[in-house]
Image (tube, grey):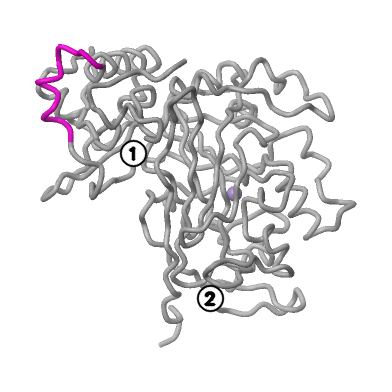
Amino acid sequence: MTLLRSWVDSANSSETPFPLNNLPYGAYIPAGEQTPRCCVAIGDQLFDAAAAEADGLINIDGLLLAAASDWNAMMQHGPDVWAAFRARLTVILSEGSADQATAEKYLHPLAGARLAMPITVAEYTDFYAGRHHATNVGTMFRGAENALPPNWLHIPIGYNGRASSVVVSGTDIRRPWGQLKGPNDDAPRWGPSQRFDIELEMGAIVGQPSNGAITVDQADANIFGYVLLNDWSARDIQAWEYQPLGPFQAKATATSISPWIVSKTALEPFRCDTPAREIELLPHLRDTGPMLYDIPLSVTLNGKTIVQTNYNELYYSAAQQLAHHTTSGCPMRVGDLLGSGTISGPERDNRGSLLELSWGGKEPLETPSGPRSYIEDGDTLALHGAAQGDGYQIGFGDCVGTLLPALDDPFKG
Ligand code: MN
């Protein structure tokens, strides 16, 4: 696959995250309006797909983008409509398109655009599928001998999170209060989290419903696309609460996603295999083809890179996670969001959380903003990711959040 050329000049640069090959799905709020509208990114512009459809430039049976404030309804229509919509957009925006003169009026500069949640998150599940991350955290919490729990190599471990806490990139994050683990386990104290952290993850968006167990292949077919995801985590709340049922309030403050959903189709050239299996998976979870993606990822703290890793470091693909999620008969809904788990690699600068980077605060990270064991008030954390094609990139837009200081004690008269 090489660069598909567009009459939108900025989309033909090898530097843009949004060439015609990408066409990621987002939502923007036009100046002076309240309701988000469905759009796609092309070069340094957004293309108002809802307006283009309302005027008849896009005409796909049953699709009513103009009536929607996000992409859930479009996803509901299924893969044939996804493909027809993408094909039509590609024709409209291709170099030499007969539609150029009509389509130009639906372009608006991305710079300064107010972006909104691209979907309504139906439900949110977060997994723990990065082996380096699980090994690092397990070593810190339970010792090297017990780092990986005995189930880890057999199932993608996860917990049910809160859809209500998922926010779009650019949303400020407020340092939470909570019960914090004290020097000994029976004496917690109430206070603002002192160990607030990031988790570098990708999120898979479920685009088709299921009711009952589905295969890994079916799960892959049901995934609509992917986002960058930051699972903000209060480690001192987590350390106190996590046994025996897993994280709860530590993960409930906020989870940020990138403003753009990159379709599975755009990522197709970057498919790759999961790592070698130490123990063969049971048949229903076995790999049936390349279902991970080669996507270099990084994190910046106040503009300085602190992490570099790759989505292909995960042990389980999103398709395996989704298939596992359904084994109990759990129904899945359009708009379900599956967090991958923190994506760390083998080296120190591949670690996708400050918990790992500072090794539980024992080895603070040196940054131009000063040493960091965890996030300080005012810090801006940004996740970046772009698959590298032949002369083009497939990017997600940054997933950014700034940590605001804790409010006053909510329970103090
Ligand atoms: Mn997580």
Residue underneath mark 2: 192
Residue underneath mark 1: 118
**Was residue 44 drawn as part of the magenta stretch in this picture?**
no
**First in sequence: mark 2 or mark 1?**
1
Which quadrant of the figure has residue 340?
A: top right
Q: Residue at x 18, y 31 (%)?
A: 67
Compared across the picture, whether 146 is left or right of 250 comes to: right
Q: What crowding class fits label 2: few (fewer than 14 Cα within 10 Å), some (14-19), or many (20 or more)?
A: many
- Which residues are the magenta region? 95-107
Give the distance between the C-alpha atoms of the residues marked 2 and 1, in whole angstroms.
Answer: 31 Å
Res 209 label: none
Which residue of the protein is positioned furthest toward the bottom in this rendering? 413
Instruction: Measuring from the top left, give residue 317's x and y in whole percent.
Output: 63, 29
Which quadrant of the figure has residue 265?
A: top left
Instruction: Measuring from the top left, give residue 266's x and y in whole percent.
Output: 44, 23
Compared across the picture, whether 120 is left or right of 103 comes to: right
**Was residue 102 drawn as part of the magenta stretch in this picture?**
yes
Task: Indicate the secondary structure of the residue bearing disc 1.
Answer: loop
Q: Which amino acid does label 2 sit on?
A: Pro
Task: Indicate the secondary structure of the residue bearing disc 2.
Answer: strand
Q: What residue type is labelled 1?
A: Pro
Instruction: Measuring from the top left, give residue 30's x and y in whole percent.
Output: 16, 44
